[in-house]
Amino acid sequence: MLRTARLSRSALCFITKYSAQRSAAVLYSVEAYGHLPSTSSPITPTLKFFNSVDQDGGPIPTYRILDGAGKPLDDAQMPEVDEALARRMYENMVKIPSVDNVMMNLHRQGRISFYVTSYGEEATLTGTAAALADDDEVLGQYRESGVLYWRGFTCDDLVNNCLGTIADPCSAGKQMPMHLGSPKHHFHQISSPLATQIPQGAGVGFALKRDPARRGKNCAVVWFGEGAASEGDFHAGLLFASTIPSPTLFIARNNGFAISTPTAEQYHGDGIASRGPGYGIHTVRVDGNDVLAMYAAIKEARRLCIEEGRAVLVEAMTYRVGHHSTSDDSFAYRPRQEVEDRKRMDNPIARFRRYLEDRGWWSEEEEAALKAKLKEEIMGAFFRAEKLPKGELGNMFKDVYAGEEPWTIKENRAELARLLKKYGKTWAPWRTELQKHEGAGKDITGEEL
Ligand SMILES: Cc1ncc(C[n+]2csc(CCOP(=O)(O)OP(=O)(O)O)c2C)c(N)n1
Ligand SMILES: [Mg+2]
């Protein structure tokens, strides 16, 4: 990585010329030779297949500002990030793994049933969140809690969601942990089936365009992993946003894996970015572990999106340092050493910390104080949430559908009542679990259990 950054400019020119010669094709000018009625492309007598969006045949370059040691690249244009903003970004980045560490421990102790970490993707999330307006509509996949933290979603909110207490602001304990959502923070409810958020996001973008109060002011922001981009919904969503233009910003987190499937088995083309131009969408590939590059790229992507009222695609190249989720052991399919190397060589937090320290914007003492403050915040949130009950059992049937309650829900509730009457008092796991709910199931059975 460092070596690439130091390649001399003459070497880069040589590579460009060399590939240009290889790909030379005879093109007839449109003025003299015209073009087919179905396309505006010039006529050529050269039979040449292509397999790259770059006419030189090379891969799409990756935009970055900071090298691996946190030093700005010689030719990079620095985004306007002053000390206060830089420190806030750094603090958000550190908060993400701090929360993840505690929640992973709670999972190991059996106190929460499921969790998803964002280890390694702190710069992708924070650089984006900082460049957006806080009321841009976000549709996440599930690994984007750092975007919510930036907008003021608290540790109490997160822990209540994971424990499914009455104070869960996302789904009142109905959803799995980490299926976050917060209308207050303009963050749409996450749902498990991959990629469903992509066409939905194009719809949200279109709705923003149709709303006079928000047209030209906000965009929809759709997150997805490179694995989710293999779903048909990815293609439907991008086609929708390009043919029915809308200010929709698509952000692909290319973190190397879809659970155990590495990218080498997910696509044969040039990542996700190569697909954008196929849909006529402005596209850029960014070093997702460089928070300043993410910030600058998203600022510009958002501007394009809103000013042109058209979709933009950003591919953030990063690495999923953690396991996929608490249901996964990634060392079954990737070497431990690979993970250790990536943590060391391409650590987004360490890299940005060095940038801050070089400017005198951060110190050892401030690091210790931040870590202590975060620990207190998260543990405090846990102790508060632990004392709260879960809502009434019947809540799980409420607000599932709008309008009249369908017969399926009525039937499910009746079946649960039957089972509770039969086993609620006798089967120990149910007896224990029921006590955690307000009313201990009385709202379903109509009687004391
Ligand atoms: C339609 C669908 N198929 C499969 C799954 C199971 N699944 C959950 S996450 C995941 C991997 C997604 O990988 P990626 O989109 O790259 O996101 P990452 O986990 O790497 O952030 C899979 C296959 C699902 N939730 N939905
Ligand atoms: Mg992935």
Image (cartoon, grey):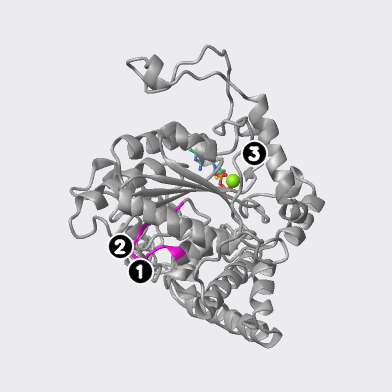
The answer for how far apart the CA atoms under marks 2 and 1 are is: 7 Å
Secondary structure beneath dot 2 equals helix
Q: Magenta span has 254?
A: no
Query: Callout 3: 10 Å neighbours few (<14), some, many (20+)?
Result: some
x and y percentages locating residue 7 in the rendered image: 75, 51
Side (left or right) of 421 relative to 24? left
Query: Ligand 1 near label 2 (Cβ, under 8 Å)?
Result: no
Figure disc tally = 3
Q: Which residue is mark 2?
A: 443
Residue 134 magenta-highlighted: yes
Residue 351 position by quadrant? bottom right
Point out residue 13 in the picture as x, y percentages from the top left corner.
68, 42
Q: Magenta residues?
A: 131-140
Mark in the foreground, 1 or 3: 3
Secondary structure beneath dot 3 equals helix
The three-letter code of the residue at mark 1 reads: Gly
**Residue that mark 3 sits on:** 263
Q: Pick whichever, 138 or 111, lies toward us.
A: 138
Type of amino acid under label 2: Asp
Task: Tell me whether the residue at label 1 lies in contact with that at label 3, contact meaning CB atoms closer than 8 angstroms.
Answer: no
Q: Residue 320: x percent and y percent? A: 65, 52
**First in sequence: mark 3 or mark 2?**
3
Circle 2 crowding by C-alpha within 10 Å: few under 14, some 14–19, many from 20:
some
Look at the numbered disc 3 and say if its residue's Cβ is closer than 8 Å to ligand 2. yes
